[in-house]
C-alpha cells in the first residue's frame, strides 16, 4: 500500500473509527446514506480514492466484492 493511501486511511480511521471505509451502492454512501453527486460517483466507479463529501469516509464501489 502506498504510504499516502495508508496515511489517508489512518486519518479517517482515527476520526471515524471502524467505519472509515464504506461501500457505495447505486451512488449512495454506505456510511451516511447520502446520494453522491454524479462526478463523485463516477470517480468511485473508476476506483479513484474518494471521500464522501458529507461524512468523510473513504468510498469503495461494490464491484470490488465481485471482482468486476
Image (cartoon, rainbow, N blue to C red):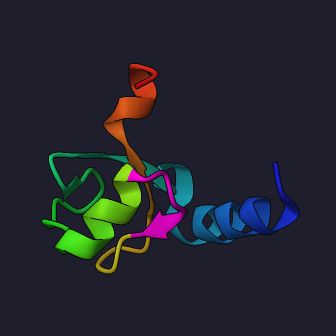
Q: Is residue 39 above or below residue 65?
A: below
Q: Main secondary structure of the magenta part?
A: loop
The answer to whether residue 46 is left or right of residue 4 is: left
Residue 19 lies left or right of residue 10; in this view the side is left
Residue at the image point whose x is 30% and y is 62% from the top: 42
Q: Please, is residue 64 above or below residue 18 in the view?
A: above
Quarter where residue 31 is shown: bottom left
Segment tinted magenta in the rendering: 46-51
Q: Residue 47: image x %, image y %?
A: 48, 51
Which residue is found at the position 45% from the left and 31% from the top? 64
Q: Residue at x 51, y 60 (%)?
A: 48
Question: Relative to 62, does residue 7 appear above or below in the rendering?
Answer: below
Q: How many marks?
A: 0
The x, y position of residue 24, in whole percent, is 29, 48
Q: Is residue 55 magenta?
A: no
Image x and y of residue 34, in percent? 15, 67
Q: For this view, does 17 lie left or right of residue 52? A: right
Name the quadrant containing residue 41: bottom left
Quadrant of image for the C terminus: top left
Q: Toward the viewer: 15 or 5?
A: 5
Which of the two residues, 22 or 2, is positioned nearer the viewer here? 2
| Residue at 33%, 80% in the rendered image | 53
Q: Residue furthest bottom?
A: 53
* Residue that lies at the very extreme toward the right in this rendered image: 3
Q: Residue furthest top?
A: 66
Above or below, 50 relative to 31: below
- Where residue 6 appears, x then y in whole percent? 77, 59
Amino acid at each position: 500500500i502506498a504510504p499516502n493511501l495508508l496515511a489517508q486511511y489512518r486519518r479517517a480511521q482515527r476520526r471515524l473509527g471502524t467505519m472509515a471505509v464504506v461501500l457505495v451502492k447505486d451512488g449512495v454512501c454506505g456510511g451516511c446514506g447520502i446520494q453522491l453527486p454524479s462526478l463523485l460517483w463516477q470517480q468511485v466507479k473508476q476506483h479513484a480514492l474518494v471521500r464522501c463529501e458529507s461524512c468523510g469516509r473513504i468510498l469503495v464501489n461494490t464491484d470490488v466484492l465481485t471482482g468486476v
